Amino acid sequence: MTTDIAAETLKLPSLDYAALAPMLILFGVGCVGVLVEAIAPKKARFPVQLVLAVLGIAASLTAIVLAAGTEKVTAAGAVAVDGPGLFLQGSIAVLGLVALLLISERSLERGGAFVAQAAVTANSEADRDQATRGSGATEVYPLIIFSLGGMMLFAAANDLLTMFVALEVFSLPLYLLCAMARRRRLLSQEAALKYFLLGAFASAFFLFGIALVYGYAGRVDFAGIHAAVLDSPNDIALLYIGLAMVAIGLLFKAALAPFHVWTPDVYQGAPTPVTALMAACTKVAAFGGLLRVLYVAFERSQWDYRPVLGAIAVLTMLVGAVLAVTQTDIKRLLAYSSIANAGYVLVGVLAISKAGLASSLFYLVAYGFSVLAAFGIVTLVRDADGEATHLSRWAGLGRRSPLYATLFTFLLLAFAGIPLTSGFTAKFGVFAAAIEADQTWLVIAGVITSAIIAFPYLRVVVMMWLSEPGESTPAVSLPGALTAAAVTIGAAATLLLGIVPQPLLDMTENAAHFVR
Amino acid sequence: MNGLVTLAAAAGEVKGGEAATFYLLAPIAVICAIGMVWARNAVHSALFLVVTMLCLGVFYVLQAGPFIGMVQIIVYTGAIMMLFLFVLMLVGRDASDSLIETLRGQRMTAVLLGLGFAGLVATGLYRALGNLDSVGLTQANSVHGGNVPGIAALLFTKYVFAFEVTSALLITAAVGAMILAHIEKRPDQKIAQPERMRARFAPDNYPGPKPGPGVFANSTSVATPAVLPDGTQSERSMSKILPQRELTAAEAAPKGTEHQ
Amino acid sequence: MDGYLGSYATLGITLLAGALVFVGAFSANRVLRPRRPSVSSGKFESYECGLDPVGGDWAQAQIRYYVYAYLYALFAVESVFLFPWAVIFDRPGFGGAAVVEMAIFVAVLALGLLYAWRKRVLRWA
């Protein structure tokens, strides 16, 4: 009898390599990046890594474009390739590419925004020495590539187990990147530690949730859970507790209140280009995962989770808007703004409809571009000690450098949702979808908080334009080609998506169908 | 003893041994888990954690998951705990957290909320699972010819993509550990042996070993108390039995410092 | 001694016997040895040729140990995956696929070791 079993054949599941290519390319490029770190001479590493990373992401993007229109579940149900998945992967690739430009900037500061050796004791003699000279660590490139690969898998994962592995793959490099700021090392290390500890905690919740959902459904793949939500003979409490815990893990990554507390500290302490990456790409990936879990696996329990997540959306928008008012640091202000924006995306998500899905996708892309440009400008305003992020230092910036002050004002107006910016189109989309789905209370909360959060934005605008530049107002550095490109792309996208949003709206509309 | 029959017994027939082991180890596991949180000394915490993890390993074995049980013991109580202890040795055993709360009442609130949450989850789970029997264990453990082959069959077919991606996770972790813990010396910072020797025997450098911290000895007698950095003599540096021998003043005086 | 837990009962009994031998030996020692409580405090002191230590006995470890321990943990995790792999790769028609799967996994981890080696993490100087 035992021999029969030993003779049982196993075979590999069919892997659709074309559909998996976007992720496989990135993981492969990440490994090559580590290899380059190991064998390339020190001088050559930066250009090699930069070219490798850009080519890798471009190749991945090409693979995504080639796979457009595919709708299938591959790798034995582990990965779903469908409209929203490919759209999110494409957004991650494009936004990642723009963030990569910010990350690679080396003309603002000698050696770039990253520390050469993160292990050197903060504030020691050696640390002060390496802050002023020494080129930044190039390990950041393989880390970013692994992270982007993980995000793409997260947005496409079709079972909770794969999703958990993807969550870890994209989070771990981010924890590391946070600890690698060239200046203010202690703040940076604190940010990394906080993010790591809280992130590990959230992952533990996610894992516990998976176990409970498995206990309820007997499966971890989304189609199986979907089937089990109505049919399983097990007690429904298992499903509720499991879903709540899975949701906690996802809400943490998307920085929704009350799981947002890490955001301001981490956004402030991390190197600004990494903050930009987190605000743009991580948000896309986290909402991608959340969308798939809510729309594919737990669609049939929407009546149960909708009020709870609705309350979370209202709380998030309120917390983001109200606390943004009290901020005195531009990076923290943008962090709270990102929290509030996550709340608006959740409003779109909670429509649980095709329109809700499409508008959420649009919002994520629009916000991603704006936030990349905004953080790009933050890297430019600097003095001898690095970036001048305190708000009082921004007073009178409009007189010193009208161009960047204008750009920043435009981006803040986009965050506030003023017409002719992508922010307006995006907010209009999610609110319309929510009203259509009878979630008017969310829209009312959204409009009220939009009014509140306009205040801190306008305060910055007033400060930049109506104050006299003081002694301490730093000059805006002339950006290198890379930062200039990133800011231009971000601002142009914000403008274009505000004036001619139709192509992208059509794209999201066409993409908005999940495969189960 | 056929392997299948062995595993068939796992699904609830061996009540006696299973129950006895569980009720023996469960209190130990819980007490050690509480001890881990409670212990002031970080090393004690780590050792409590070892016991809890060992108990968990045994529980996994009891619940017909021998592979995960052994992994728990080998990887967690072996490798991971070793990492924990190294970290503790890095920070120092005496280092303890400051107990000043930056937010007033934070700890109390955290404890209450934590207990509330644990109570909520526990009652929910008890309600859901209180009178359920495990099903499918026998099947899961026999369909591919045993526990380990069963895990292998899933890992290398259905979840092969997740498995391969795990390697990306592991290499990220390795690179990260080296970034955050390893300082690469520049070639010009390296001091070769000849330079070291020259510096050691250079004029004005005492080539012998330096005295231990806090001790300034001017005599080789054990009866001479050490001098602390502030100039006072430390009685603690002398064996208590020495004064009982009643040395003469000349014997106890520092040697080699007399003015001649 | 049969059934699923039977094989483990042997293990449990061995452990129990080991513990009993240990406890028995020490109790026997305690019972049989002569007891001469000391009256002078000198018995507990270091002998006169030794100085009583001043301060704690805890020394900080080098962070290098941590990196080594970490590399060890990494390969311990790898070995966990190697065990199940070893029992199924002889399934008919699966050998090639299994070898390729594991080769990719091990190669990626070996890349980490190569990185450590090139960064001179493995060199103790």
Image: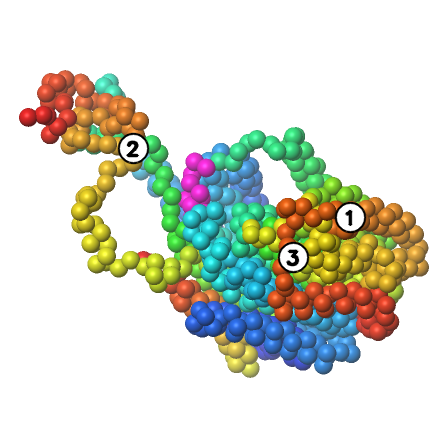
Residue at image mark 2: B214
Q: Quadrant of residue A293?
A: bottom right
* A11 left or right, relative to A335: left
Instruction: Check if residue B85 falls in the magenta segment.
Output: yes
Give the image location of residue B54, x and y in percent: 49, 48
State the extent of the magenta-drawn residues as a range: B83-95
Q: CA distance from mark 2 to mark 3?
A: 53 Å
Q: CA distance from mark 3 to mark 1?
A: 17 Å
Q: In the image, which is nearer the foreground, mark 2 or mark 1?
A: 1
Badges 2 and 3, same chain: no
Badge number at residue B101: none
Residue at image mark 3: A476
Few, some or many C-alpha atoms within 10 Å of disc 3 (few <14, some 14-19, many ≥20)? many
Q: Quadrant of residue B153?
A: bottom right
Q: In the image, which is nearer the foreground, mark 2 or mark 3?
A: 3
Could you tell me which chain the residue with mark 3 belongs to?
A
Residue drawn at 24 percent across, 28 percent down: B226
Between residues B241 and B147, which one lies in front from this camera angle?
A: B241
Few, some or many C-alpha atoms within 10 Å of disc 1 (few <14, some 14-19, many ≥20)? some
Sequence order check: which comes first, mark 3 or mark 1? 1
Do we see residue C32 in this rendering? no
In the image, residue B121 sits, relative to residue A302, either above or below, namely above
Residue drawn at 41 percent across, 44 percent down: B89
